[in-house]
Image (cartoon, helix red, strand yellow):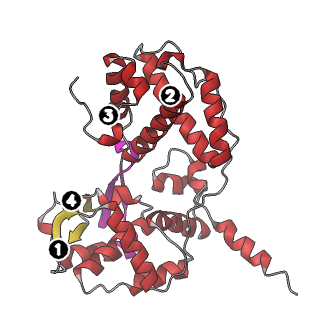
Amino acid sequence: MTPLVPRPSLALPALIAAAGERASVRFLEFFAAEIRNPHTRRAYVRAAGEFLAWSEAAGVPSLTAIQPLHVATWIEGLTRSRTAATAKQRLAAVRHLFDWLVTGQVVAVNPATSVRGPRHVVRIGKTPVLDPAEARTLLDSIDATTPGGLRDRALIGLMVYSFARVGAALAMRVGDVFPQNRRLWVRLREKGGKAHAMPCHHTLEDYLEAYLDGTGLRSDPKGPLFRTLGRGTGRLSDRPLPQASAHAMVRRRAAAAGVATLVGCHSFRATGITAYLANGGTLETAAAMANHASPRTTQLYDRRGDRVSLDEIERIRI
C-alpha cells in the first residue's frame, strides 16, 4: 500500500493493520481528509492510538470485535487518571473515528455511540487573563525601535484588539492588512478556513502601520506578515514565525515587563474580549468579532466575574 500520510505519528495501530488494506486506507483518510485542523488532528491521533492500543492489550482480537463495553471501560479508566474534559475529548475522537469507519463499511456499528462520557460543564475558561493595566504595561514595555520590537508589539496588539487566535495571526500575509473606508482592516482565516475581516482599533492601526513602515514589508504583499528574525542580524527573514516561537516571545516579553501572570498567546484574545465586555460591549457582538459560532463560546472568555470576586474577597476585614 502506498503511504498516504508520511508522518510517523500516524503509524497504523495493530488492530487497524490486521483488519486489512481497506481498513488501513480508511483509517488514514480519516486524519488526512476528515480532520482539517492540525491541533484537532494531533489530539485525535493520540486518542485513537491510545484506545486501540488499550483494546489490543485488553485482549480484543479484532477491530470488529470492539464492543461498547470496551469503550466504556476505557473511558472509566480515563476518568480516574485524567480530567473529565480529557476523557470527553478522547471519547469524541473515538466516536468520530468509528462513525467514519462505519460509513466506509469497515465496521458494521459504532461501539462508542451508546457510551456516555463523564459530566463536564464549563461556565468559565481557564485561560489566564491580564488586567487592562498589565496589558498596557506589557505593550508599552516593548522597544519599538527594532524590527523585532515592532513585530512583537504588532502581533500582541493584533491578538488583543482583534481577538485573533495566534494561529490565524501567524497565517496572515502582508496583503491581509489593507485600507478600507479610510480605516485599516485585517483579514483573518480562522478555524475551518473561515475568512473573517474587521476594522482595526486605532491603537492596533498605529502598531501595524509602524510595523509595515519600519520593516519595509509593504513591498511584499504575498509574503508572511509575521516573520522570524535573521540569526545575528536582527532583521526580518522571509520565513513565517512558528507558533512555538510566538509563545516563547510572549513569555519573554511578559517577564521583561514584570507581568507575573503566566500568560500565553490565547491570554490576549481573552484579555481583549473581557475588556470589550467590561466597557459596555455586548456578548453577541463580541462573538461576531471573535468569529465564534455561538455566544456561549465567547462567554467562556468573559472574565469580568474575576474582578467581582476579588472585590468581594476584600470585604473580609479581620
**Which three-letter amino acid code belongs to the residue tagged 1?**
Gly
Residue 182 located left or right of residue 270: left
Query: Which residues are drawn in magenta?
Result: 181-204
Task: Name the residue beneath numbered marker 4.
Answer: 175
Is any part of residue 202 visible from this angle? Answer: no
Under circle 2, the secondary element is helix
Drawn side of residue 66 relative to residue 256, left or right: right
Query: Of residues 299 and 33, which is closer to you in this image?
Result: 33
Image mark count: 4
Quickly name the residue at label 2. Answer: 56
Q: Which quarter of the figure has residue 243?
A: bottom left
Q: Is residue 151 visible?
A: yes
Residue 8 in percent (x, y) is at: 30, 41
User: Which residue carries the number 3 mark?
Assistant: 32
For label 3, the SS is: helix
**Residue 268 shown left or right of residue 175 in the figure:** right
Choose mark 2 or mark 1, whichever is in front: 2
Q: CA distance from mark 2 to mark 4?
A: 51 Å
